[in-house]
Image (cartoon, rainbow, N blue to C red):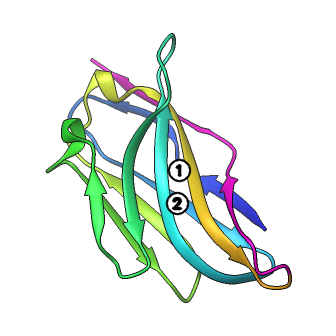
Amino acid sequence: VQLQAFGGGLVQAGGSLRLSCAASGSIFSINAMSWYRQAPGKQRELVATILSDGSTTYVDSVKGRFTLSRDNTRNTVYLQMNTLKPEDTAVYYCNGQIRARFSGRTSDYWGQGTEVTVSS
């Protein structure tokens, strides 16, 4: 199982970006997918999670600005980030709690980070 993230970049404050994370490989089911971020000198924090039933949760600092959605047919999640602020600058990582097809085990998988820089 692999996760691949796309969509980071440089944007001015107030702008928008959309991050994508695609899961591939021998997947039986996806329990949850999340986005984390880590700013320089700070700990990694959970930004948003979407469960298999489509329900979502967000860290308070992004509520009303970020929207997490999923396309089950593509095993892909999208993080739409609007009204970006300089404090959103970080490396963003996607995470999946995925049950593998052959082993039947559910494990955490991580994508490579994608950098988001918001200039003031």
Relative to 97, say whether 62 is above or below.
above
Q: Secondary structure at mark 2?
A: strand
Q: Which mark is residue 50?
A: none
Disc 1 target residue: 7
Would residue 80 appear left or right of 44 to someone viewing this image? Answer: left
Q: Is residue 73 left or right of residue 69?
A: right
Q: Residue at x 47, y 49 (%)?
A: 35
Q: How many marks?
A: 2
Magenta residues? 103-120
Residue 87 to residue 105: above or below: above
Q: Which label's residue is closer to the chain start, 2 or 1?
A: 1
The crowd level at tag 1 (other Cα within 10 Å; few <14, some 14-19, many 20+) is some
Q: Which residue: 30% across, 46% down?
A: 16
Specify the amino acid type for callout 2.
Answer: Ser
User: Looking at the image, which is closer to me, 111 or 97?
Assistant: 97
Percent coordinates x, y for residue 6 in the rendering: 59, 53
* Quarter of the figure that contains the N terminus: bottom right
Displayed quadrant of residue 54: bottom left
**Residue to which mark 2 is pinned:** 20
Q: Residue at x 64, y 70 (%)?
A: 98
Quarter occupied by the C terminus: top left
Give the main secondary structure of the magenta stretch.
strand
Kindly give the residue lying farthest to the right in the view shown: 102
Image location of residue 10, percent across then percent down: 45, 32
Report x, y in % for residue 15: 26, 40
In reply to whether residue 108 is colored magenta, the answer given is yes
- Tell whether label 1 touches label 2 (CB within 8 Å): yes
Left or right relative to 61: residue 28: right
Q: Secondary structure at mark 1?
A: loop
Q: Amino acid at mark 1?
A: Gly
Q: Nearer the viewer, mark 2 or mark 1?
A: 2
The local crowd at label 2, few if under 14, some if 14 to 19, many if 20 or more residues have their Cα within 10 Å, is: many
